[in-house]
Amino acid sequence: MQIGRVIGSVVATRKHPSHEGLKLLLVQPLNLDGTDRGDAVVAVDALDAGVGDRVLLTNEGFCAGSSVGRWPATPIDAAVLGVIEEIELLPDVRGQR
Amino acid sequence: MQIGRVIGSVVATRKHPSHEGLKLLLVQPLNLDGTDRGDAVVAVDALDAGVGDRVLLTNEGFCAGSSVGRWPATPIDAAVLGVIEEIELLPDVRGQR
Amino acid sequence: MQIGRVIGSVVATRKHPSHEGLKLLLVQPLNLDGTDRGDAVVAVDALDAGVGDRVLLTNEGFCAGSSVGRWPATPIDAAVLGVIEEIELLPDVRGQR
Amino acid sequence: MQIGRVIGSVVATRKHPSHEGLKLLLVQPLNLDGTDRGDAVVAVDALDAGVGDRVLLTNEGFCAGSSVGRWPATPIDAAVLGVIEEIELLPDVRGQR
Amino acid sequence: MQIGRVIGSVVATRKHPSHEGLKLLLVQPLNLDGTDRGDAVVAVDALDAGVGDRVLLTNEGFCAGSSVGRWPATPIDAAVLGVIEEIELLPDVRGQR
């Protein structure tokens, strides 16, 4: 999984029937030092995360599809799986936290 | 998922039998600022999107395969899952919309 | 899926038992302007494509594995799914065809 | 799989129910010469690895999901599958070990 | 799949129980001209390939997992599927062989 930050949301009017009721978040993947890691992805919100939250992001379809309990009928390839509270780094590997 | 723009279509005469009746779209993945994100992909149209539409794109096989209700017998690795109406960005993260 | 060009073939003498009888093609993925998109991949021929053909290529394992009707017992991660006859591009997005 | 080094851990308070009891490690993928290979990923600990260990890492969802015996109901896309004791390199290909 | 060269092996003492008895090879993916294609990966040996062999490599989890007949219980994301004897290239596309 990756660390990411929720930076917005996406609204689709016409959509795949199985997406009805799912909330789509814009999530910016982050490097350990907090800088952007590529561009933002559109991820399904699997636990009611809020804009601004630092989250645990999966950007892989098999994994994401199983996160909302609708597998395999719902096409999803990215999901927010947790709200990260703390990142602990080995001191002698990387000094920053 | 990614944000993309439908920029064309592809016609295959000889094709995998399970692809019969599927419409193949050319979709250009986009960054949040609207610039191109890599090159275009060939995606199955899962909801009758039109050329020029801004769409929700999956580019992952497990996800795409389930989008047309023919899983797992139909080989598909990209699909258009929604037509995007609005993208809402956290103001203090990225100013543009 | 991607657009590709069949540029050769690969012969393996010792091979996975389930690969017996499968034809392995070398396929060069292409950008929309016809230039190379990364390096060539080895793909299973799911419809008797010929060297030189412009084809519909999948480079994803779940998708490719289902293309030869031997899923999930045959390990395959790339396959040729169609021979492309025509690519239609939105005129005001990209002028070339 | 890739070679990686455990460099820390991640704590998520609000999380996917199926993640209850799983330990999340920060793993830095490594090149053969020991340099960093991209940025760190968040991986599930499938065998009680410790911070500082050199490990066998999978960063693919289908594979990782099956590593903790909760497949397919638990969304996971990266896992630590082994602690590496020795890497043996063909002498005339690469001299370093 | 990709073309690769077996350049070594990896030994893990503590490992996922399902990996017992599997041989882990270090495989360097290759471009068509024989140069390195990214860094080496750790792949399961599905057919007793030897160090130095030019092989057919899959680096995708669903595919690799099915190669050793232990699907879906064994987490694997890369495997050697064949020993390549001959690569035939279209003469007017690429002259080298």
Image: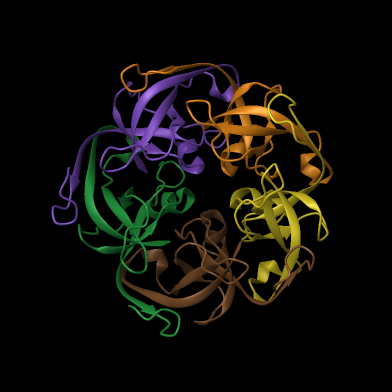
Chain colours: A yellow, B brown, C green, D orange, E purple
**Relative to residue D30, is residue D9 drawn left or right?**
right
In this rendering, the answer to whether E50 lies above or below B35 is: above
Res D94 → quadrant: top left
Residue reaching furthest to the front: A95
- The quadrant of the image that shows the N terminus of chain E is top left
Residue A48 or A51: which is nearer the viewer? Answer: A51
**Relative to residue E32, is residue E72 drawn left or right?**
right
Residue A74 spot, x, y in % from top left: 64, 61
Residue C35 spot, x, y in % from top left: 31, 62
In this rendering, the answer to whether B23 lies above or below E22 is: below
**Residue at position x 24%, y 58% in the image:** C48
Residue C66 spot, x, y in % from top left: 43, 52
- On the question of residue B66 being in view, the answer is yes
- On the question of residue E16 being in view, the answer is no
In this rendering, the answer to whether B5 lies above or below A85 is: below
In this rendering, the answer to whether E84 lies above or below A33 is: above
Residue D37 spot, x, y in % from top left: 54, 36
- The quadrant of the image that shows the C terminus of chain E is top left
Res E31 → quadrant: top left
Residue D56 or A13: which is nearer the viewer? Answer: D56
**Residue at position x 20%, y 60% in the image:** C52
Residue B88 or E85: which is nearer the viewer? Answer: B88
**Residue at position x 68%, y 24% in the image:** D47
